[in-house]
Amino acid sequence: MSAQELVATAKAMVAPGKGILAMDESNGTCNKRFEALGIAPTEENRRAYRELILTAPGLGEYISGVILYDETIRQAKKNGTSFVKVITDAGIIPGIKVDTGAKDLANHPQEKVTEGLDGLRSRIAEYYVMGARFAKWRAVITISEKIPSRGCIEANAHALARYAALCQEGGLVPIVEPEVLMDGDHTIERCYEVTEEVLHTVFNQLYVQRVVLEQIILKPSMVISGKDCPKQANVVEVAQATVDCLLRAVPAAVQGVAFLSGGQSNEVASAHLHEMNARFSSILPWSVTFSYARAIQQPALELWKGDNANVQTAQKTLLHRAKCNSAARNGKYSPEMEKLAEPAIADEIAQIRT
Ligand code: 5MM
């Protein structure tokens, strides 16, 4: 793929009114989410759930790209149509998670480093032939009193940069995801400090590895209070702190920023994205959108419950969250949107819940 094609793909991933749907849960994570809702953790249930998502009518109106897992990119609809065909027919770009997970970092208790560089060049080549046009690699940074360490930040930043360089060489746009976890009782100020250090380190490593910033999407976490912090920053404070932090640490050449939701509630994740776009779009050098997993999927998964009879209602709920986040990406979301959508499917939802 040429440099122009990589830029065009990156631009399309963050196009106005659109964002990315992360559905790249590894089997372990997907099974955990199923089991919490009493859904059997089988390959067929994972396939059926992914079919529900990918066949939601009108998904392509709000979603530019979907991130798949290795098992999912090889799967097909019940009628045999491959998921990759379903996705491209809907005008959506297929993407693929290529990391192999966060593992314990030697000599660094409680810290992780993401693995997956071995054999990555050939896996990228295989995924490209299968139809993927972008990839994702997630690094995980934990905050507590004495961490993150420099060793953890540098190891993860180096791996992200090596991954990104290999993706560009192989024709995939890399999504660079350094996630600073919300777990803990730290303040928003501490989250700011850690996020800024992590982003500076990541962009330094991207520079060292000669990654072309116009051909990447950054997928950061927002600057937010730890979930057990007694003082929770409000929506305006989160938007302000996140924008300040990113303006200081993310070069203007980056094609787009697509936030993860990280465990925020659905409405709050939409409100934060809206606030950033509504207040600051005139000063932001990059497009700012979403790349949410839980904040789009969770209500649909809870309604589906593994039952075929619930598919259409679950799809409407999924579409609703995609639409709210699409509005937020344009700075046009309001909590009213949540109320307006409810009556249309309220009866169906009530029936499933009883
Ligand atoms: C879908 O979740 C992804 C991680 O899955 P594994 O831990 O099973 O590999 C994750 O990378 C996800 O893409 C992002 O964290 C965004 O998800 P949220 O739920 O934070 O929006």
Image: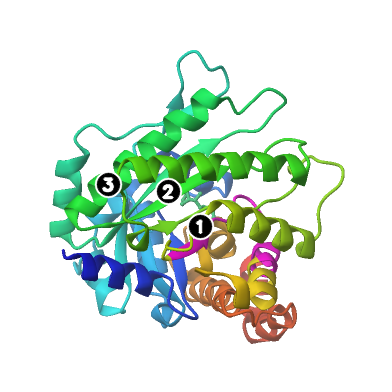
Mark closest to the chain's N terminus, 3 or 1: 3
- Label 1 residue near ligand 1, CB within 8 Å: yes
Q: Quadrant of the N terminus?
A: bottom left
Query: In which quadrant of the rendered view does residue 52 lie?
Result: bottom left
Is residue 270 a member of the stretch shown in magenta?
yes
**Which residue carries the number 2 mark?**
25
Q: Quadrant of the C terminus?
A: bottom right
Q: Nearer the viewer, residue 324 or 320?
A: 324
Magenta range is 256-272
- Label 3 residue near ligand 1, CB within 8 Å: no
Q: Residue 234 location in percent, x, y?
A: 81, 59
At 43% from the left and 66% from the top, the residue drawn is 308
**Which residue carries the number 3 mark?**
165
Query: Do callouts 1 and 2 mark residues in contact (Cβ within 8 Å)?
Result: yes
Please determine whether, in this image, residue 326 is positioned above or below residue 1: below
At 60% from the left and 54% from the top, the residue drawn is 248
At 70% from the left and 75% from the top, the residue drawn is 279
Total count of labels: 3
Q: Element under label 1? A: loop
Query: In which quadrant of the rendered view does residue 298 lie?
Result: bottom right
Instruction: Give the amino acid at mark 2.
Output: Glu
Mark 1 to mark 2 CA distance (whole Å):
9 Å
- Label 2 residue near ligand 1, CB within 8 Å: yes
Q: Tell me which colouring the rendered structure shows.
A: rainbow
Mark closest to the chain's N terminus, 2 or 3: 2
Decide: few, some or many residues near mark 2? Use Cα within 10 Å; few <14, some 14-19, many ≥20: many
At 52% from the left and 69% from the top, the residue drawn is 285
**Which residue carries the number 1 mark?**
293
Q: Nearer the viewer, residue 35 or 259?
A: 259
